[in-house]
Amino acid sequence: MHPTEEQILRLLPALEELKGDDAGAVTFARAAADNLRQLVGTGVFGALTGRSLALMRTIANDQNMRPADRTVAKVLLAALDSRSGCTKLSQPEICHRSGLSRSMVRSSLRRLADSGYFAVIEPSPEEWLDGDHVRRYRPQFEG
């Protein structure tokens, strides 16, 4: 992940949780958070390339995929670890990066897996015992 993108993602919770007597400032902070989330979602900091871009185009052209599915796929592909070939993000982290609700993320992950775009890898028993309950998502590249 690009360092600027990491900084933005760390800043988002503070902007979203800003409270106070100045309603205009609170509204501005929340709008800024939405705009920053959309900016990160464009992929401008780490545009998808190669096989990830090809898979994203396939998903984007699939009439059975919903806009939320495309957003979740983009988040997963942008966070892909090139060494392991997987993305390891918790559902709350996917929600945070996408701006989608937990139920929308859960439904999108299910559709992406059911459609064969991502394989879901459950934590091993050893990982589970160590407190690592996060699933990994492996993109299913063609060819």
Image (tube, helix red, strand yellow):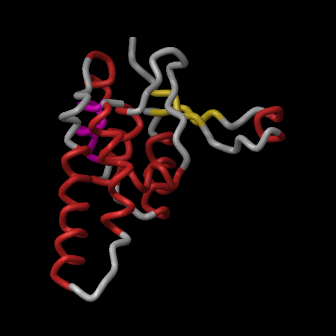
Q: Residue 59 appears at what percent x and percent y?
A: 30, 36
Residues 38 and 65: in front is 38
For residue 94, above or below residue 2: below
The residue under the point 48% across, 33% down is: 118
Looking at the figure, which quarter contains the C terminus?
top left
Residue at image location 50% in from the left, 32% down from the top: 87
Which residue is at a point 45% across and 17% down the rendered structure image? 82
- Asked whether residue 58 is drawn in magenta, I would say yes
State the extent of the magenta-drawn residues as a range. 56-64
Above/below status of 122 relative to 51: below
Q: Nearer the viewer, residue 18 or 87?
A: 18
Q: Is residue 106 left or right of residue 23?
A: right
Q: Is residue 93 above or below residue 119?
A: below
Q: Quadrant of residue 50?
A: top left
The location of residue 117, given as percent across then percent down, is: 43, 33
Residue at image location 41% in from the left, 37% down from the top: 76
Compared across the picture, whether 10 is left or right of 130 comes to left
Q: Position of residue 2 (x, y in %)?
A: 31, 30
Q: Residue furthest front?
A: 21
Most frequent secondary structure within the magenta stretch: helix
Image quadrant where one finds the N terminus = top left
Instruction: Report the side of 61 relative to 81 (left or right).
Output: left
Q: Is residue 127 above or below residue 64?
A: above
Considering depth in this image, is 101 or 118 the residue closer to the camera?
101
**118 relative position to 37: left or right:** right
